[in-house]
Image (cartoon, rainbow, N blue to C red):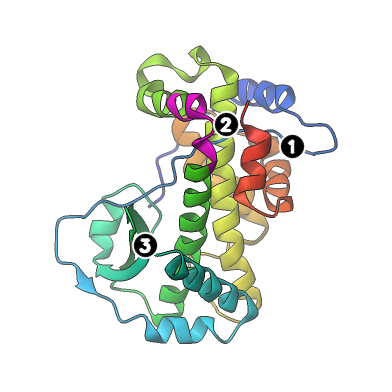
Amino acid sequence: MRHGMCIADTKFMGNLFKKSFMPLMLLGLLTTGCVPQFEKANGDLMVLDSSSAEGLLSKTSTGNQSLGDLTTLRNQGYTISYLSMSSSDIQSVNGHNGGGYKISGSAITIYVSNGLASQEQAHVIAHELVHIKDDLEVDFYLRSYPYVSTASQNFVSTYKTQGVNNFDQRVVSYVLGTLFCTEARAYSRNQQLANEGLQTNFFAKGSSLPQFIDQAYIAKFGVSYGSYANNMASWCLSNSSMTQIQGQLVW
């Protein structure tokens, strides 16, 4: 679901961007290892038959990339299940319209709105698989940087009461940068699918993607990338993996 808009401190974010600027890279470094996840909502959950959605994914090169990610996760020992839940339940938790995921040990559950057509289900699955893969990479990477993980968790838990300006800018940059990049990478997968013919009414944002992420995800922290959003999206997508992104965001 789209998060409510907050008044953005664009001057503060611009300073973050400039201070985090990496030579030879055209953008700011800001993040969170906090990918939106879904807890079990109130209401009925039904096992989803994903065969139609996966069949649609198999017809595109990008979709086959998503199916390859699915196979890789299974080969790594994860079990993948799909559950269908009502749109109202999905909108009651912290995530976008359409779906979400939960990782519990070696069990991964992908939630899909029960009101979606097969092509939209395919987009949900592809989108969430990017998040899942990135989330696991972040988790693994931060094992070597426990102080980053602790500082990030503290920021996410207390920024509403302490105010973003009172935190170490490196922490804010890491959290917001990771968050921006996870969304840019997931929605980019949807855009690629749409470009290859798998249509969607929800997930393909085109040239408005940077502003969408800024408004729907970053603004909830009371800040904004503003005019730097396009550069941030370009930088996120110029990196080949979330591990590569983490290597430039941690301190």
Select label 2 or label 3 by which is in front.
2
- Image coordinates of residue 16 in percent, x first then y, are 65, 24
Mark 3–mark 1 Cα distance, whole angstroms, equals 30 Å
Return the residue nearer the eye: 64 or 172: 64
Question: Which residue is located at x 74 percent, y 37 percent?
Answer: 27
Identify the secondary structure beneath mark 3.
strand
Q: Is residue 77 magenta?
A: no
The amino acid marked with disc number 2 is Tyr
Q: Is residue 197 left or right of residue 20?
A: left
Question: Which residue is located at x 68 percent, y 36 percent?
Answer: 248
Q: Is residue 227 above or below residue 158?
A: below
Q: Are marks 2 and 1 in contact (CB under 8 Å)?
A: no
Q: Is residue 37 above or below residue 106?
A: above
Q: Is residue 95 left or right of residue 211?
A: left
Q: What residue would you read off at disc 3?
A: 99
Dot 3: few (<14), some (14–19), or many (≥20) neighbours within 10 Å?
many
Return the residue nearer the eye: 39 or 195: 39
Identify the secondary structure beneath mark 2.
helix
Say whether disc 2 or disc 3 marks the residue closer to the N-terminus.
3
The amino acid marked with disc number 3 is Gly
Q: What residue would you read off at disc 2?
A: 174
Identify the secondary structure beneath mark 1.
loop
Dot 1: few (<14), some (14–19), or many (≥20) neighbours within 10 Å?
many
The amino acid marked with disc number 1 is Leu
Mark 2–mark 3 Cα distance, whole angstroms, equals 25 Å
Q: Is residue 214 visible?
A: no
| Quadrant location of the C terminus in the rendered image | top right
Q: What residue would you read off at disc 1?
A: 27
Q: Is residue 145 above or below residue 101?
A: above
Residue 152: image tag:
none
- Image coordinates of residue 71 in percent, x first then y, are 49, 73
Mark 2–mark 1 Cα distance, whole angstroms, equals 13 Å
